[in-house]
């Protein structure tokens, strides 16, 4: 079937309502973090990365009468246009595609039922989704890249012609914010070792190189390798932290990508909490030979906050657009780490030979 490639991407984030808008804002380091009316334990407004409500599609009329939580309703609206943007290159001859969707691992008072959410998202977006072959991965920050990994494996085995993979999440929920605040994980002026909660959605449309050529589709990037691992000493675990999770994911990634050039750029999901920066440092030290001497590090959470399960697919889309337009080097690692131990990484590269050095920012 040939290499797996990305032919479409879509995003909705606090810094952009489309993939090009988000990419331009992230490249220029434009941040959009807003204080909202909801109050924390010190009676100060939470500072979050939030998409303005009037910028989101309205909830589908058939869903308005259903018992949706505030968070689920918001996630459906966040995912709507991003999903449609990613599906735009899909040939009209393809009647439906499966969706592999990353979802939150931290729940609010009413947990979101994954299968039901997929059905509601299909109705909300009016997209041509094959729900019988779709599934969700409620594994938090790593979930979107885990979905990409599963999609790539399915395509490589010839099980599908196209797969849509992505993630959607929102920390802008009063119960979730209150819980994180109680755990001292929300960044404030007295708690610098915390993160700014955010929300967003990101999707990539994947196929094989041969199918992309057959349908004359533009290729944004080629997937070189995908990997996953677990960190037993995760942020909520009583077990000691040894740094084996992300380091293990990198080890598998580089083994699968044997012969690839050293990574010239890394898109990292760390969000401002020291734990994640330390994890990345351990992983790089253990695999230093696989990184270019002057590799770039991008962590767009500084612009839009921590967007949970959407983090990986949004960063993957940013990496693809950056390589395509020449301001990010190839190959690039995109990785995400979940609170409860899941780790996922993807190595992507420009699909055509590089004739010149990439333009630096």
Image (spheres, rainbow, N blue to C red):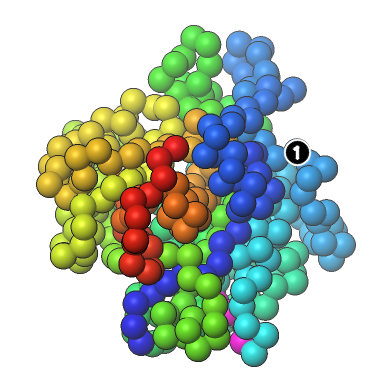
332 with respect to 79 (left or right): left
73 with respect to 14 (left or right): right
Residue at position x 28%, y 61% in the image: 227
Q: Which residue is mark 1?
A: 52
Please identify the residue farthest to the front as the structure is shown. 356
Q: What predominant SS class does the magenta segment belong to?
A: loop
Residue 70 location, quadrant: top right
Residue 325 seen anywhere in this rendered image of the structure: yes
66 with respect to 333 (left or right): right
Task: Give x and y (percent) for residue 311.
Answer: 49, 47
Task: Give x and y (percent) for residue 328.
Answer: 41, 48
Q: Quadrant of the C terminus?
A: top left
Residue at position x 53%, y 32% in the image: 29
User: Which range of residues does the magenta coloring cover?
Assistant: 94-98
Query: Which residue is nearer to you in this view: 157 or 181?
Result: 157
Q: Quadrant of the N terminus?
A: bottom left
Task: Give x and y (percent) for residue 117.
Answer: 64, 62
Residue 127 location, quadrant: bottom right
- Mark 1: secondary structure: loop
């Amino acid at each position: 079937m040939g290499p797996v490639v990305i032919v479409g991407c879509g995003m909705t984030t606090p810094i952009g309502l489309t993939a090009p808008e988000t990419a331009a804002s992230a490249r220029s380091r434009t941040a959009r973090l807003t204080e909202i009316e909801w109050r924390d334990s010190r009676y100060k407004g939470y500072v979050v990365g939030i998409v303005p409500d009037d910028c989101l599609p309205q909830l589908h009329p058939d869903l308005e009468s259903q018992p949706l939580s505030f968070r689920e309703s918001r996630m459906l609206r966040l995912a709507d246009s991003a999903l449609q943007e990613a599906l735009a290159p899909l040939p009209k001859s393809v009647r439906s595609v499966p969706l592999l969707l990353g979802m939150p691992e931290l729940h609010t008072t009413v947990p979101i039922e994954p299968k039901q959410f997929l059905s509601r998202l299909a109705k909300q977006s009016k997209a041509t989704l094959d729900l019988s072959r779709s599934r969700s991965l409620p594994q938090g920050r790593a979930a979107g890249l885990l979905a990409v990994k599963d999609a790539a494996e399915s395509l490589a085995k010839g099980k599908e012609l196209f797969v849509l993979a992505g993630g959607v999440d929102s920390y802008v929920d009063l119960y979730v914010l209150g819980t994180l605040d109680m755990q001292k994980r929300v960044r404030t002026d007295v708690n610098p070792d915390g993160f700014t909660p955010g929300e967003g959605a990101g999707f990539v449309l994947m196929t094989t190189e041969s199918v992309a050529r057959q349908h004359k589709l533009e290729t944004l990037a080629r997937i070189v390798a995908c990997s996953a691992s677990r960190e037993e000493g995760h942020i909520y675990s009583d077990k000691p932290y040894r740094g084996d999770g992300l380091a293990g994911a990198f080890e598998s990634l580089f083994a699968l990508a044997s012969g690839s050039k050293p990574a010239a750029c890394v898109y990292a999901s760390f969000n401002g909490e020291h734990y994640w920066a330390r994890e990345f440092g351990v992983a790089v030290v253990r695999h230093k030979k696989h990184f270019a001497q002057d590799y770039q590090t991008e962590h767009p959470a500084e612009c839009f906050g921590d967007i949970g399960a959407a983090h990986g697919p949004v960063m993957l889309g940013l990496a693809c657009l950056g390589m395509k337009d020449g301001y990010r080097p190839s190959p690039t690692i995109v990785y995400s780490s979940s609170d409860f131990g899941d780790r996922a990484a993807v190595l992507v590269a420009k699909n055509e030979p590089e004739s010149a050095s990439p333009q630096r920012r």
